[in-house]
């Protein structure tokens, strides 16, 4: 005991290490903000520019143009990069928690079977196509010594998800979130994401403990236990905690709860993002925190942490790998499978609930945006070794391409779907019919 008490405290980071870290964060954040704003002005999602900031500063551009500068700013030292990565990981978990709070459980209940059918088909079809694609992709796309089954499962999960934050932003910008189709798209995306996180937890557990009947059974049992704990224990505890929390401290408390939930699932050898997402849903379902109270948390997460995370994610991409024809062709195939899977799944679901082809194509166009969620999935896969830099680059490129495709596709397809009187009344009630509202699809336009 005496030797422990007498031991010297852990020394702080060296001055040179701290200088590089602070410079990294400042440069990445500045580049992400500038390129994110540029992407927004060009009609694209901000994450396109934020990711490209990392691409520009990473091996794809700066590493080729000026190796000495790139070597100083982003040295190949695990300890140095881990400091930057830690900031990105915190941002990712808070971002996923905020996304979880966007899932309206009450709205999901009200939509009932219609949303369930679309969610099921838009999840299962791309998942199956993704797994088939993963089984057939050339070995050069896989990490050396990787398990083909786990890799295929991961590709399936990566292609079956949608991105609630990106979709919600697109629907809001196009002023169609109030429409029935907008609500259906958002709910289906929420269900796809929720199931996607669960599947990701199983796949990454298989990657770390091995593929066996016992390992898979244990993963599923752990997952079921986490879900039961969230519903039966965590939610009531959150109600008590949030009731006694002073409103001035609610932002900090919510952040602490999200990070603790993430730590809990990580301790159970499941992915931390699963805990963050489930905690976000549980916080939202208590209805004890006014959305306005969390505005500052969303501002900090979306304005600071998220851009740093996406820029850091961009650093891991190496677009020079596309110079290999096999890699380039594989990227095209994965993108084609991703788009076909979501459109095919949405079309099948829409047909089953009696919607016409333009409604079906609108659903596919909205659900096809993978953005933030697929980038998080790719980052998790890279961290646990399911994919290497090649596979990671392909998956992130798919996330970027589908996010860029969504707005123009939605404008085109929804321009051929007539607005109902109920939707118009809802638009007036929400004050979205004013001339100073964002540009939208013309009301009442139809083919």
Image: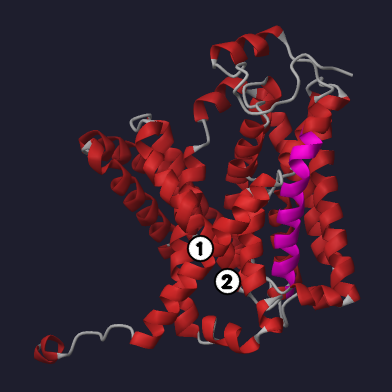
Which residue occupies the foreground of this view, 423 or 348?
423
Image side of residue 353 versus residue 198, left or right: right
Q: Residue 378, image x and y in percent?
A: 64, 63
Q: Is residue 247 left or right of residue 417?
A: left
Q: CA distance from mark 2 to mark 1?
A: 22 Å
Most extreme residue toward the left is 2
Instruction: Work out whether residue 162 can be spotted.
Output: no
Residue at point 74% right, 15% down?
419
Please name the residue shown 67% across and 55% down the image.
Answer: 48
User: Does 333 appear above or below 168?
Assistant: below
Closer to the camera in the image, 255 or 190: 255
Q: Which residue: 58% across, 57% down?
A: 34
Label disc, if present, on residue 383 of the rendered structure: 2
62 to the left or right of 325: left
Q: Please, what is the dominant secondary structure of the magenta stretch? A: helix
The image position of residue 247, as x and y in percent, is 25, 36
Q: Which residue is mark 1?
A: 29
Residue 269 is situated, as x and y percent measured from the top left of the image, at: 48, 65
Q: Position of residue 137 (x, y in %)?
A: 85, 68
Q: Residues within 10 Å of mark 2 (few under 14, many from 20)?
A: few
Sooner in the amino-acid sequence: mark 2 or mark 1: 1
Q: Quadrant of the N terminus?
A: bottom left
Q: Which quadrant would the C terminus be assigned to in this image?
A: top right
Disc 1, SS: helix
Where are the magenta residues, as a range? Answer: 390-410
């Amino acid at each position: 005991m005496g030797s422990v008490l007498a031991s010297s405290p852990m020394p702080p980071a060296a001055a040179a290490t701290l200088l590089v870290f602070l410079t990294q964060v400042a440069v990445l954040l500045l580049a992400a903000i500038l390129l994110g704003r540029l992407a927004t002005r060009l009609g694209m999602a901000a994450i396109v520019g934020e990711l490209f900031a990392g691409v520009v500063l990473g091996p794809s551009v700066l590493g080729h143009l000026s190796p000495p500068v790139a070597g100083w700013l982003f040295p190949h030292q695990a300890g140095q990069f881990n400091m930057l990565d830690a900031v990105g990981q915190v941002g990712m978990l808070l971002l996923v928690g905020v996304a979880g709070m966007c899932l309206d459980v009450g709205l999901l209940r009200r939509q009932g079977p219609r949303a369930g059918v679309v969610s099921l088909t838009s999840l299962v079809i791309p998942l199956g196509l993704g797994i088939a694609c993963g089984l057939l992709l050339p070995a050069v796309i896989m990490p050396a010594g990787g398990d083909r089954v786990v890799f295929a499962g991961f590709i399936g999960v990566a292609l079956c998800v949608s991105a609630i934050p990106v979709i919600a932003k697109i629907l809001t910008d196009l002023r169609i979130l109030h429409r029935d189709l907008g609500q259906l798209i958002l709910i289906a995306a929420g269900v796809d994401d929720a199931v996607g996180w669960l599947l990701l937890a199983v796949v990454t557990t298989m990657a770390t403990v091995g593929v066996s009947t016992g390992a898979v059974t244990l993963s599923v049992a752990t997952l079921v236990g986490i879900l039961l704990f969230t519903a039966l224990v965590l939610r009531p505890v959150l109600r008590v905690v949030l009731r006694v929390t002073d409103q001035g401290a609610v932002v900090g408390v919510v952040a602490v709860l999200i990070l603790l939930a993430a730590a809990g699932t990580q301790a159970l050898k499941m992915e931390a993002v699963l805990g963050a997402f489930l905690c976000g849903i549980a916080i939202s379902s208590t209805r004890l925190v006014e959305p306005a109270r969390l505005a500052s948390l969303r501002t900090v997460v979306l304005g600071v942490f998220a851009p740093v995370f996406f820029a850091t994610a961009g650093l891991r991409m190496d677009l020079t790998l596309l110079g290999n024809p096999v890699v380039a062709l594989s990227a095209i195939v994965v993108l084609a499978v991703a788009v076909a899977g979501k459109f095919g799944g949405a079309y099948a679901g829409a047909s089953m609930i009696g919607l016409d082809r333009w409604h079906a194509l609108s659903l596919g166009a909205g659900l096809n945006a993978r953005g933030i969620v697929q980038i998080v999935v790719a980052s998790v896969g890279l961290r646990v070794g399911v994919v290497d830099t090649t596979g990671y680059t392909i998956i992130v490129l798919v996330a970027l391409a589908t996010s860029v495709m969504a707005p123009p596709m939605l404008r085109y397809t929804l321009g051929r779907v007539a607005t109902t009187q109920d939707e118009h009344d809802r638009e007036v009630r929400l004050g979205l019919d004013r001339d100073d509202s964002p540009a939208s699809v013309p009301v009442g336009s139809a083919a």
